[in-house]
Every structure is written in C-alpha cells, then in structure tokens.
Image (cartoon, rainbow, N blue to C red):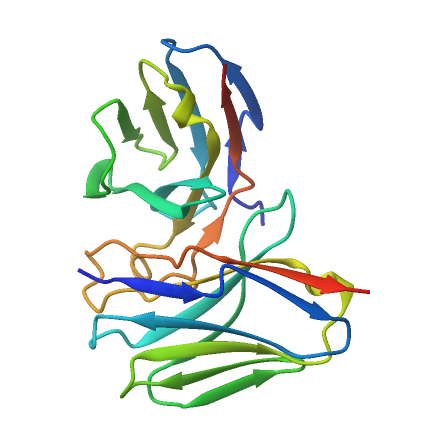
C-alpha cells in the first residue's frame, strides 16, 4: 500500500521568508498530489494540487513541485504572512481509487513576527 | 451549496461509554470517509462508505464502526470508549466518480471533537 512521509513536523520561519515542506511517497503509480491547509480549529481545505504530467504549479505565493523519479513533492510558500500559520498536510492517493487515501502526518508552520 | 455537516461539534464522554457521530455530506456526494485526527498522528483513516457499503477500512479496532444511510448520511460509532479515543473526528465527502482522489471533489467537515474523561 501507499506510504507518505512528510517533513518537517514543525517549521518556524520569519515573516517574509520562504517555507518549504516536503513529502515522499512509495506508490509509483500515484499521479495526483494535493496539499491541504488546516487553520487552528478549522477543517482541512485544499490549497493547491499537482498532477504527474507537470513538474511545477504556482498559485500566487504558493507553489508545488513534483519529482516523479525521486517520488517526492514539495510545497513552497514565499513571502510568508501571519495567516500562513497552520498545519499543512500532503496526500498521495493511490491510482486504484478503491484503495484508501493516505495523508502525511502534517507540518505545523509558525510564522514569527 | 451547503458544506459537509458534522454533529455534534463537541462531545465529552466517560471511559466505557459509547458515542455516535453524524456526518451529512454535500448534496450529490455519495462517498463519505472518516478520519481520526490527533496531534501526534495526523489524519488516520478510519473507513469509507458509499452506496451504504463499507468500501475501505483503516487499522482501528472493532470498537470503531460505521454505517451509511440511503440518503448518504453516515454515522460512526465508538463503543467502550478509552482515553486514547480523544481526538477530532473528521468526515469528508466526495462524488463517487472522484472517490479515492483526495482534494478532487473531496471536502472535509468541521469535525467533532471528542474528549474522553
């Protein structure tokens, strides 16, 4: 089955600096990679995703990069702001939609003033 | 359109009791998945239902069970509660076509925070 490892578990960055969170996966057949953001006391919400036919996708200050050969994908947040403080989760759904979805254990991002 | 609705939002139970949590998916979504969220373990998959049938199950003891009704609403039940069951329980709904593709039509509810004392 799929296995997803997410690093780091906690990350503190100065406001304005960049943050990078990385996930590695085991199922080489995975072809869709979403990132979720969960603010304190709220539900996880999809913020960006990437499909395996592209290597990078950007949406304003956030971007996701994918390295299929190395089986890892990363979330990049530039010019961090206080509202970026949250827990971020990656997932690597299996190609077989009847298999369960596995999420990474999450990264708690703190934006320091 | 209305989002995924989970009730109750908060619950306090004592050890040994049982609890039932409810999840109403987005209209038209027939797949409902349940997750347990704890600080150290992240999002742990419990089970998934669609068409009133359990399709997948995570690595949880038999004290955790669920069901889905014909209107796609789902309930999960935890019997003989233990202190370690304290967690945020999240459900997520998706259309049948999108099930298995996290994020692609996959929407989380706000969760039920269960505290076992």
Q: Spot the residue most to the right.
A: A113
Give the residue at x 24% y 41%.
Answer: B51
B10 above or below A107?
above
> Which sits in the foreground, B108 or B12?
B12
Q: Position of residue A28 (x, y in %)?
A: 21, 77
Above or below, B10 relative to A91:
above
Residue at 21% of width from left, 38% of height from top? B54
Q: In the visual, does B111 lie left or right of B63?
A: right
Q: Residue at x 27, y 88 (%)?
A: A69
Where is residue B34? Give x, y as percent: 37, 40
Vertical placement of B111 versus B27: above or below?
above
Does residue A113 appear to the left or right of B1 in the view shown?
Answer: right
Q: Is residue A58 above or below residue A3?
A: below
Query: Residue A34: in sight, yes or no?
Result: yes
Residue A10 point in image, percent of width and height: 55, 59
- Is residue B32 among the parts visible in the rendering? no
Q: Nearer the viewer, residue B33 or A15?
A: A15
Of the 4 image quadrants, the one containing the N terminus of chain A is: bottom left
Name the residue rendered at 29%, 84% in the picture. Answer: A70
Image coordinates of residue B30 in percent, x first then y, are 34, 46
**Callout count:** 0
Q: Is residue A113 left or right of residue B57?
A: right
Q: Quadrant of the C terminus of chain A?
A: bottom right
Residue A7 placement, left or right of B59: right
């Amino acid at each position: 089955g799929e296995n997803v490892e997410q690093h780091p578990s906690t990350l503190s960055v100065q406001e304005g600096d960049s943050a990078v969170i990385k996930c590695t996966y085991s199922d080489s057949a995975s072809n869709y990679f979403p990132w979720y953001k969960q603010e304190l006391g709220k539900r996880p919400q999809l913020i960006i995703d990437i499909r395996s036919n592209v290597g990078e996708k950007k949406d304003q200050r956030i971007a996701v990069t994918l390295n299929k050969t190395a089986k890892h994908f990363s979330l990049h947040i530039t010019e961090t702001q206080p509202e970026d403080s949250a827990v971020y989760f990656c997932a690597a759904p299996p190609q077989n939609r009847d298999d369960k979805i596995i999420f990474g254990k999450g990264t708690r991002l703190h934006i320091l003033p | 359109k209305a989002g995924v609705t989970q009730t109750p939002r908060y619950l306090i139970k004592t050890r040994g009791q049982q609890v039932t949590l409810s999840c109403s998916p987005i209209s038209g979504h027939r797949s409902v998945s349940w997750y347990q969220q704890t600080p150290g373990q992240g999002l742990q998959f419990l089970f998934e239902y669609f068409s009133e049938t359990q399709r997948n199950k995570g690595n949880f003891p038999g004290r955790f069970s669920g069901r889905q009704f014909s209107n796609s609403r789902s309930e999960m039940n935890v019997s003989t509660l233990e202190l370690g069951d304290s967690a945020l329980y999240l459900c997520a709904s998706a259309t049948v076509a999108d099930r298995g593709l996290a994020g692609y039509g996959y929407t989380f509810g706000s969760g039920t925070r269960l505290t076992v004392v």
